[in-house]
Amino acid sequence: MRVETGRILIDTARERQLIRFPWWVLLLAPLLALLFQVYVPVIFRFLNFLEIPLLLAIYFPLMWRRQIPGTLFGCAIGLFQDTLSHHPIGMFGVAKTLVGYFAASVGMRFDVDHWMVRFFLVLFFFPFHRVFYWILSNSVLNIPLELDPGRMLISAILNAVVSVFLFNILDRSRDSV
């Protein structure tokens, strides 16, 4: 992680380096995140606010800095989350697809290796994901879903704090090419 520079825009091709992850990280991290999302809030109600699959749908596209893989990763993790939840198939898939695309777009333009940039990106993408999911639910499927801005803001802040630590752990597994 580069902390010594004050720049947030990417200037050179060296800064746009391709970042790869071992195959086992790309399989194990989403699997653990989905299992966490399904089983942990049942046992520990106070962890219901955590959206680990969303954090991964933000992190990997940010690091890849490529929109197509980011979009596909967001779609895949969203659809797998749909299959393990009681929600209609495709709701999380569509919402996380957009998050993956926009996260990759941001990663192409900004230096996202600093923890504070990541913190604010999660702080933005969490409500974006929730609001888009709410729009899909209410307008497309006509399933009434309540949107609580206060609770959403608190959850966004807590997820952003968790993301700083989670992203730091995931950074240790990446390879720069």
Image: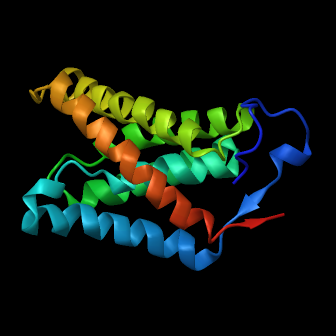
Q: Residue at x 65, y 51 (%)?
A: 63
Give residue 174's position: percent from left, percent from top. Answer: 67, 67
- In-front residue for pair 53/164: 164
Any part of residue 143 in sight: yes
- In-front residue for pair 150/72: 150
Quadrant of image for the N terminus: bottom right
The picture quadrant where one finds residue 52 is bottom left
Quadrant of image for the C terminus: bottom right
The picture quadrant where one finds residue 106 is top right
* Residue that protrudes farthest toward the bottom in the picture: 24
Q: Residue at x 30, y 57 (%)?
A: 81
Give residue 98's position: percent from left, percent from top. Answer: 48, 35
Give residue 130's position: percent from left, percent from top. Answer: 29, 32
Q: Residue at x 23, y 34 (%)?
A: 154
Q: Is residue 67 above or below residue 143?
A: below
Give residue 101's position: percent from left, percent from top. Answer: 56, 37
> How many numbered dots are placed on residues in this image?
0
Q: Is residue 174 left or right of residue 157?
A: right
The picture quadrant where one finds residue 132 is top left
Q: Is residue 149 above or below residue 158?
A: above
Any part of residue 93 in sight: no
Q: Is residue 132 left or right of residue 57?
A: left
Q: Residue at x 45, y 58 (%)?
A: 165
